[in-house]
Image (spheres, rainbow, N blue to C red):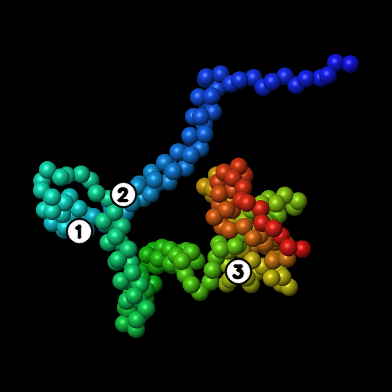
Amino acid sequence: MTEFQIPPPRKRGVLASLRASFLTGLVVVLPVGLTLYIAWAFIGWIDGWILPLIPAAYQPEALLERMFGPEVNFPVRGLGVIVFLIFTIIIGWIAKGLIGRSVINWAEGLLDRTPVIRSVYSGVKQVTETFFGTKEKSFDKTCLVEFPRKGAWALGFVASKPKGEIAERLPGGEDYIGVFVALTPFTSGALIFVPAKDVIMLDMSTEDTAKMVVSAGLVTPTPKVIEA
């Protein structure tokens, strides 16, 4: 019998090698480039709102001209972000004091008596407190929930428990939680209220869950060792 021999692997051509190198470089460059572009655009968006409120003498271009002369002239971004951060920190520090709370309560009372505006302010305030408030954490845990039918499981973000009329009208005898089911590519989703016993809690972080949803499952988190 003749011994079976495995043929040697074919060498890649020049075009195939260039294509593989291009794809490898794209995997490295694209995430970094998109991140820098989004950060640059976000900083420019904030500057577009804040810089018009700053006097012309304190604009970045004017400061550069005074420091280095008129020959140095190039666009500078980031001053609006710095001003916004300082302003927000000062407002938060004032709001924690007695006088600040009194002023805020007076302003909220004024807004609550204004038609249309009170509805907008109330909705924005609830959303802001949900994401940034310290009283109740939402969207800091992820889970699996049967959606959109029984037997099909979807990734979800644990929201707050139902309150008000929703809590009163849900069938009694169950402990319900709100789950936001994000849809790929994360442009929309569904908020559902399900019994807590029907939800499978996950150890995945919200960042890993968001990446998995946005990438349609292409990006999966590193599996953790589950203790028995």
Instruction: Give the mark nearest the N terminus, 2 or 1.
Output: 2
Nearer to us in this view, 223 or 163: 223
Compared to 93, does 225 lie above or below?
Answer: above
Q: Residue at x 13, y 56 (%)?
A: 57
* Residue position marked by numbered label 3 in the rendering: 161
Q: Which residue occupies the extreme bottom position in the image?
A: 98
Q: Mark 3 packing: few (<14 Cα in 10 Å), some, or many (20+)? A: some
> Residue 44 shows which numbered tag?
2
Q: Position of residue 54 (x, y in %)?
A: 20, 58
Q: Please identify the quadrant where the C terminus is shown.
A: bottom right
Foreground of the two, 95 or 40: 40
| As drawn, 55 above or below 217 | below
Q: Tell me which label, 3 or 1, sits earlier in the chain.
A: 1
Percent coordinates x, y for residue 36 in the rendering? 39, 45
Counting residues from the start of the chain, the first of labels 3 and 2 encountered is 2
Residue at horizontal 54 percent and vertical 28 percent from the top: 20
Q: Secondary structure at mark 3?
A: loop
Mark 1 sits on what residue? 54
Gap in Å between the C-alphas at discs 3 and 1?
Answer: 43 Å
